[in-house]
Image: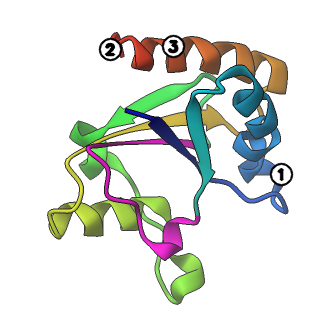
Amino acid sequence: MNMKIYILGNELVEEDSLPLRILGNLRKDFKKIEFIELDSTEGLPEEEELIIIDSVINTDKIVIYTEKDIDKFMSSPNYSVHDFDLASSLKIAKKLGRLKKFKIIGLPSGMNEDIALKELKGIINDIKNGIC
């Protein structure tokens, strides 16, 4: 089975761009993993276990969220489709029965790229080996 990891982010917003800035290195270091850029407003892919890398705020270390944490996610106020965020997408997918298991690897928005990449490599290897 080919492992897929979905990458979220916005290159135009500094606080939301870290996953995209390290994407090239991830692809180079993990040739057998398919890294796919994803816009959460377009709907989430249906996977047996969805793995996402995204930016997070209010933390200084990498965090991993699973389906058990979904009720803790805060959604932004949704006034238009532009306000629709990952938390909203996850909650809707779960309600529709399209989401069973997921891991969100949250990278602190201000984290150094080299540190993020080094720690993320360990996490991805742990996921591949069924440790995480």
Q: Position of residue 75 (x, y in %)?
A: 42, 64
Instruction: Check residue 130 in the rendering and tell me which mark sits there, or answer none.
Output: 2
State if disc 3 and disc 2 touch (CB < 8 Å).
Answer: no
Question: Where's the C terminus, which quadrant?
Answer: top left
User: From this viewpoint, which residue is outermost toward the front?
Assistant: 1
- The residue depicted at 82 percent of the width and 27 percent of the height is 113
Give the CA separation, mark 2 to mark 1: 32 Å
Amino acid type at image mark 1: Glu
Mark with earlier residue (2, 3): 3
Instruction: Check residue 125 in the rendering and tell me which mark sits there, or answer none.
Output: 3
Residue at label 1? 14
Q: Is residue 117 above or below residue 73?
A: above
Q: Nearer the viewer, mark 2 or mark 1?
A: 2
Local SS, label 3: helix
Report the span colored magenta.
39-55
Q: Indicate the quadrant where residue 28 lies.
A: top right
Residue 55 makes an appearance in the image: no
Q: Position of residue 20 (x, y in %)?
A: 75, 46
- The residue depicted at 44 percent of the width and 35 percent of the height is 2
- The residue depicted at 82 percent of the width and 57 percent of the height is 11
Residue 83 or residue 128, whichever sits in front: 128
Q: Position of residue 37 (x, y in %)?
A: 63, 55
State if disc 1 and disc 2 touch (CB < 8 Å).
Answer: no
Instruction: Determine crowd level at label 2: few under 14, some 14-19, many 20+ residues with C-alpha closer than 10 A.
Output: few
Give the CA separation, mark 2 to mark 3: 9 Å
Question: Where's the N terminus, which quadrant?
Answer: top left
Q: Position of residue 91 (x, y in %)?
A: 28, 63
Local SS, label 1: helix
